Image (cartoon, rainbow, N blue to C red):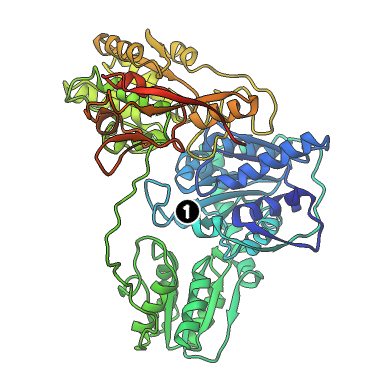
Amino acid sequence: MEIIEGKPGNTFLLMGNEAITRGAIEAGVNVATTYPGTPSSEIADTFSAVARYLKRVNKKIPFYFEYSTNEKVAVEIAAAASFSGLRSLTCMKHVGLNVASDAFMTYTYVGCKGGHIIVSADDPACHSSQNEQDNRYYALFSGTPMLEPSTPEEAKEMTRYGFDLSEKLKLPLLLRTTTRLNHARGPVKFEKTRKPKEKGWFNKDPGLVTVPATARVKHKELLDKLEEAEKISEDINFTQIIDNGSDVGIITSGVSFGYVLEAAEELKIDIDVLKLGMTHPIPKKKCGKFLESHKKIVIVEELEPYLEDQIKALAYELGLSVKIYGKTTKHFSRLYEYNTDIVTAAFAKIFDIKNPLPKAIKPPITLPDRPPVLCPGCPHRATYYAVKQVAPDNTVYPTDIGCYTLGKEPPLEMADLLLCMGSNAGTACGLAVSTDQKVISFMGDSTFFHAGIPAVIDAAHHNHDVVITVLDNRTTAMTGHQPHPGTDFDGMGNPAKRILVEEVVKGCGIEHIEVVNPKNLKKTSEAFKRALEFKGPSVVVSKAPCILLENRMKRKEGKTIPVFMVDQDRCTRCDKCITEFGCPAFYYAEDNSIHIDEQQCTGCGVCLQVCPENAIKIKKQEVLDE
C-alpha cells in the first residue's frame, strides 16, 4: 500500500485527500478523527484503509483513528490528544464545522499543545451539500491560522508543515480545501516519516477550564498569537510571487491559482501574480508592497469576497488609489465553482481583450435529465412506499441528510423539509405544535447517532404527536459505507460495541416503538398505521442493510440472487412498478411494455409485493460476479 509503504523520494499520483493523509503520516500524526462527509471523506477513509492494511500484514499501526459520532465529538477527542502533547488531525466537510463550532470557537482561546490540523473541505457548486458556505470566515471568526493548498502536492506539504506551525503558535490550524482540490489527482513526492509518540501526558492547567475570568485572559493571548502568525505569514514558503514586470497584479489562493495561470496562457498576457498560501492572517506587508507596485489589482477567489474585502481595506489604510477588480465590481460571481473558461472571460473583459475561447455550443438535441435516484433494491424505497399506503394525503415528511434524501424525487416525493443533520425530528416536533397535519419524519441510522437523539428526547418530553422514522441500513451509506455506533466494527477494523437504535430510543422515553423489515411491505404499512394512530411520539425503526452491502456479503459467500422478469401475459400495464414504486430497474420498451433490466436488478423481491397482477416472476438465480 503506497500511502504507507511508499519510499521517501519517490513520487506517486495521489488524490488531494490522500495527499493530506500522507502529509499527516509523514508528520507523525498520533490521532485522527472525523465524521465522514463529502468532499473530505477520502482523508479519513485512507486512514482507515491504512490501519486495516497494517493490521492484516501484522504491522504496528502508528496512529489511532476513529469515525466519531459527529464533528463536535471528533474535534473534542483530537483536542484532548493535543492537550496531552500528541499530534492530531480532524477532517470534515464545510457544514461539519458548524456542528463542531461550539468546541472549536473556545478551543482557539485555550490553544493546543501537540499540533492539531482541522481540515474543512468546502463545496463550491454544492456537488454534495446543502449550501456553499465559505469557511474561510471561520478562520476570521475564531482567530485560527489558515492554510489553503492549490495542488495535491501542496496539500501534503501544508499538512506536514501545519503541525509544526500549530505547535509553534500553540493554536489549532485550519486547512481549508475545496472539492476540486480534494478530488483532483497530481504527483506527490514522499518525504521521510516522523516517528509518532507512543503516548502523551496531560499536565493539569487551570487555563484549560474556560470560566469567564480565564476566557478574558485567553482572548488577549489569542490576539497576541495572531500577531505572531501574521509575521510568519510574511515569509511562509507557500506564498508565491510571479513577477513579469506587469502593471497588473492578480491576488489569488487555492485552486483559483491554477485557473489564473491557465487564463493568462489562453489570453497570452503577462501578469504578476501573488498566490497566498496562508490566508489568515494575510501577509499585510507583502500584500501592501504588491498593491503599491501595480496600477490594477484583480482578486480571483471562489465564493465570498473574503480576500477582496481585506485587500480593499488594506489599500484604504495605505492611502492607495489602485483599482481593484473582483466580485464587488461584478467581474466575478459569488456563486459556484470557477474554471479556466470563467476566469478567462473575466480577464478578457477587465483587460479589454478578445476572448479566444469558443462560446459554449448548444447541442442540436436536448438530452433527457437523469436525476440521482435510490439504488435498485434500496430498503428506503420500500419504507417510503409502505408509508404512502397508509399516510393521509396531507402528511408532512421532514427528511434529513443521507441517501434517503433522494426520496424527494418522483414518484415517491417523500421529502418536504430539510435544514441540516438531525433536523428531521426537530422540525417534526415544530410542525406538530403548529399544524393539525400528520407528521412522519425520516433520518438514517448514522444521522440518528450524529444529531437526531436530542430531538427524539424533546418529542418524548413534550409529548409531540409525531412519527419519527429511523432508516437503519447498518452503515453511513451516502459517503462510502463508513461504520458508526450502530455497526459492530470501528474505523480500524476492530470489533466494537453495537448500539441498537431501538434501545436508545426507549431510553429517551419513547413508549411506542416499532421495528420493521421494510422488505415486508404489508407489515411495514401496518406498523406505520399503528404509529399514526398512537397519540404522542412514536418511533419506527426500519431495519434492513444497504443493498450494496447485502449483495457484497452474498458475493463473498458465493450465494445467488434471483433475477426477475415481467410476465407479459399477466402484465396489465398498470404502471405501478414505475409510476408509484419507482425502481430504476424497470423500464418501458418501444412498444410501451414494461421490462426489468437484469444488469440493474438486485434481486430484493419487493416489487413482487407491489404488482397487483402477480406479473413479476423469477427468471433465474444468478451468482454475483466479483
Q: Residue at x 41, y 22 (%)?
A: 605
* Number of numbered discs on residues: 1
Give the residue pinned by disc 1: 122
Q: Is residue 476 above or below residue 160?
A: above
Relative depth, front residue between 562 and 64: 562
| Residue 193 percent across, percent down from the top left | 80, 53
Q: Residue at x 53, y 67 (%)?
A: 282
| Residue 425 appears in the rendering | no
| Residue 350 percent across, percent down from the top left | 35, 83
Q: Residue at x 44, y 85 (%)?
A: 267
| Residue 211 percent across, percent down from the top left | 54, 35
The C terminus, quarter of image:
top right
| Residue 43 percent across, percent down from the top left | 61, 47
Toward the front, the furthest residue is 569
Q: Is residue 362 above or below residue 512?
A: below
Relative depth, front residue between 163 and 259: 259
Q: Secondary structure at mark 1?
A: strand
| Residue 351 appears in the rendering | yes
Q: Is residue 51 above or below residue 452?
A: below
